[in-house]
Image (spheres, helix red, strand yellow):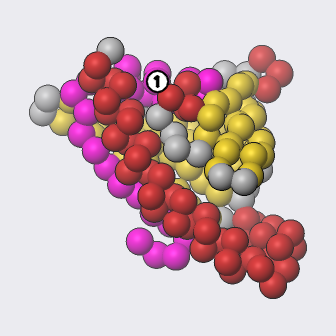
Amino acid sequence: MNELSYAESIEIARDPQSLYDMVSDVSRMGEWSPVCTGGWWDEGGGPRAGAWFTARNEVPGRVWETRSLVVAADPGREFAFMVRGNWVRWGYTFAQVDGGTRVTESWDFQPDGIAGFHERYGADAPAQIADRRETARTGIPATLAALKKAAESG
């Protein structure tokens, strides 16, 4: 992992389309994410490129909402969004493998996000960015494990 990106994969005994349907339903993200407690589509949007959604996030001592722009919505292949439109890219890809699907979740901090953090947090920006990096490093495997459990039990 470099400082500004991270990705992990897991194999799940389900087909790519059903996993895409689970992940692209932003209202369900709270079922498996350790940080995002759920989301909703803005203004009648849905899982399509160009749609916006709002997500509610929670960690000890902090609750916040973010708006995100869907940048990839290819059913059964990829679902990705940019937090705040251009700050951080979160993505999921789905690849058919023997016995199921390899799901890869990725996190990429973008240049506009780095600049935004420096504007918002000043001298504390590097620590804030490091905190987000650690949250991704621990949260991605937790999210994938919970997604696997939910997908394979239902």
Q: Residue at x 77, y 42 (%)?
A: 65
Count of marks placed on residues = 1
Q: Which residues are magenta?
A: 1-27
- The residue tagged 1 is 22
Q: Nearer the viewer, residue 70 or 125?
A: 125
Q: Amino acid at mark 1?
A: Met
Q: Nearer the viewer, residue 68 or 76?
A: 68
| Residue 8 located within the stretch drawn in magenta | yes
Up/down of 80 relative to 106, above or below: above
| Residue 147 located within the stretch drawn in magenta | no
Residue 113, position as x, y percentages in the image: 73, 65
Residue 86, position as x, y percentages in the image: 73, 55
For residue 149, which quarter of the picture?
top left
Q: Residue at x 78, y 17 (%)?
A: 44
Residue that sits furthest to the front in the current view = 61
Q: Residues within 10 Å of mark 1 (few under 14, many from 20)?
A: some
